[in-house]
């Protein structure tokens, strides 16, 4: 023992030395980039790093939202802030204009190419997606150019205190930056296709931090709604350009989207696969966005806050389960391309057990504490009754349990069961919500959600997952799969 150091001090010194050895930049870089040599373990490692970065990005997003809301409301005022929220909602709906080219479809084909060690195919798919998105952006730009002046923007937003010129300038800037950013929307899929999703999360963090700094700066100038749009959307565009440079000229040089690499066969496959994912996106809007409209029409707008606030609190475990398992989509795709069905089966079981073991107790704890939490956060007017809490808890348990199933089906490119189950669930949520709301209130709407998800997701998705795993994974049980090394 070194002189002058007590056993406790020596132990403390060792702890600091361990932390210093593992938290220095070189060690962090090794954690993010080094490969283990065991392909199966490497998939788990990359998925874990990506999920961790995802949680950090989500926490930062929530923090920034908490900070930015009072800044934006104070800066814009109630009416302008309402316009800003409406514009943001419209942009979410407009994101489906990419025909699914920039989402899971691209992840599927890139993970397949990665699994086959086929860089040329990956380059062709990336270039085809990029230039197809550029063509879509150009088409939308021309449409907006010729129709913009004809749209009665003040009537659309039903405003009175905002001048016509200010509103038109804000809408014009929003559309310009929206069109500009369309081709760059494929960048997260490129990272995820190569199981490097943590890069996408790092760039998301950068965008959010830069946006917050620009928001703080612009609130000091009092330039109105157009300056806010230019600041937030403009910074996103600049960061997207830097992100593209990193992806195509530093990280994956072979993926640089040269026009000569575009292949019509690649475009057709992306559109065919992406259209299936687009169906799931549209149906998901019916599941997750229809309730406020149903409640407003049948129960009154004052009840909407009860549902929205309670849903945000109780459905948090589903969001966390999704973020934790999403990185496995590309891992499943790469393993499928290599015929490693034994790993797929094992990973599917492990992710399901992990999400159930962590998610359901978390959902139960949140449900038990829901009323006091909501009272503190949103006030007495947002407190739900016990039935609303119970059925949202049931809905959350189903969602947590089946999230890995949906991710696995996405990864092995079996989109049809997902599209069917989500579409039927959306129909059930809307139809049964309208039926139950008049006599059971908000609890009836939530019961419709839980029942619809139970009778559609569970039989269709679980049956499909078992069917495919039984077909491919069970023959592999003759011998243990040997993971190839890099």
Image (spheres, helix red, strand yellow):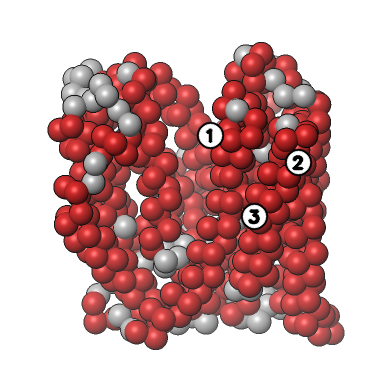
**Which residue: 76% across, 67% down?**
460
Circle 2 sits on which residue? 436
Q: Give residue 390's quadrant in the image.
A: top right
Of 115 and 452, nearer the camera is 452
Q: CA distance from mark 2 to mark 1?
A: 35 Å
Disc on res. 426: 3
Spatial separation of the CA atoms under disc 3 and disc 2 = 15 Å
Give how far across and how far down residue 67 sits, in percent.
Answer: 43, 22
Image vertical order of residue 56 relative to residue 106, above or below: above
Kindly state the secondary structure of the residue where label 1 is placed: helix
Query: How many C-alpha atoms fall within 10 Å of the one at disc 3: few (<14), some, or many (≥20)?
Result: many
Quarter of the figure that contains the C terminus: bottom right
Mark 2 and 1 residues: CB-CB less than 8 Å, in contact?
A: no
Asked if marks 3 and 2 touch (Cβ < 8 Å), the reply is no
- Does residue 307 appear in the picture of this structure? yes
- Residue 140's spot in the image, x, y percent? 26, 60
Q: Residues within 10 Å of mark 2 (few under 14, many from 20)?
A: some
Number of numbered discs overlaid on the protein picture: 3
User: Which label's residue is closer to the chain start, 3 or 2?
Assistant: 3
Determine crowd level at label 1: few under 14, some 14-19, many 20+ residues with C-alpha closer than 10 A: few
Q: Is residue 330 shown above or below 162?
A: below
Label 1: which residue?
A: 59
């Amino acid at each position: 023992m070194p002189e002058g150091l007590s056993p406790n001090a020596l132990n403390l010194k060792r702890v600091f030395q361990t932390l210093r050895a593992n938290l220095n930049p070189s060690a962090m870089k090794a954690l993010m980039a080094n490969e283990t040599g065991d392909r199966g373990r490497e998939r788990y490692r990359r998925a874990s790093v990506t999920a961790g970065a995802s949680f950090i990005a989500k926490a930062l997003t929530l923090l920034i939202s908490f900070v930015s809301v009072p800044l934006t409301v104070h800066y814009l005022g109630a009416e302008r802030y309402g316009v800003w929220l409406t514009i943001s909602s419209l942009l979410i709906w407009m994101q489906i204009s990419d025909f699914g080219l920039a989402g899971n479809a691209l992840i599927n084909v890139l993970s397949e190419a990665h699994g086959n060690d086929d860089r040329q195919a990956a380059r062709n798919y990336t270039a085809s997606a990029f230039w197809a998105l550029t063509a879509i952006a150009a088409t939308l730009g021309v449409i907006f150019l010729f129709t913009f002046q004809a749209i009665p923007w003040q009537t659309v937003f039903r405003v009175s205190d905002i001048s016509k010129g200010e509103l038109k300038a804000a809408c014009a800037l929003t559309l310009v930056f929206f069109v500009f950013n369309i081709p760059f929307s494929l960048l997260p899929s490129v990272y995820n296709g190569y199981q490097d999703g943590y890069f996408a999360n790092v760039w998301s963090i950068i965008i959010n931090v830069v946006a917050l700094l620009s928001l703080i700066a612009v609130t000091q100038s009092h330039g109105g709604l157009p300056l806010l749009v230019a600041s937030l959307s403009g910074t996103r565009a600049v960061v997207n350009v830097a992100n593209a440079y990193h992806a195509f000229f530093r990280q994956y040089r072979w993926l640089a989207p040269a026009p000569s690499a575009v292949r019509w066969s690649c475009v057709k496959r992306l559109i065919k696969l992406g259209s299936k994912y687009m169906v799931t996106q549209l149906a998901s809007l019916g599941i997750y966005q229809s309730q406020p409209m149903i409640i407003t029409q049948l129960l009154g707008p004052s009840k909407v806050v009860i549902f929205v606030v309670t849903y945000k609190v109780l459905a948090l475990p589903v969001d966390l389960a999704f973020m934790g398992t999403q990185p496995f989509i590309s891992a499943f795709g790469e393993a499928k391309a290599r015929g490693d069905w034994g790993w797929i089966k094992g990973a599917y079981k492990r992710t399901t057990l992990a999400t159930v073991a962590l998610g359901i107790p978390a959902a139960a704890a949140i449900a038990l504490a829901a009323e006091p939490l909501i009272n503190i956060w949103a006030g007495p007017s947002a407190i739900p009754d016990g039935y609303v809490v119970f059925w949202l808890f049931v809905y959350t348990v189903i969602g947590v349990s089946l999230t890995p199933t949906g991710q696995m089906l996405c990864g092995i490119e079996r989109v049809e069961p997902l599209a069917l189950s989500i579409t039927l669930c959306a129909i059930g949520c809307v139809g049964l919500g309208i039926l139950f709301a008049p006599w059971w209130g908000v609890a009836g709407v939530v019961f419709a959600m839980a029942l619809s998800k139970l009778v559609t997701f569970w039989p269709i998705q679980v049956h499909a997952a078992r069917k495919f795993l039984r077909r491919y994974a069970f023959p592999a049980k003759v011998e243990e799969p040997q993971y190839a090394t890099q």
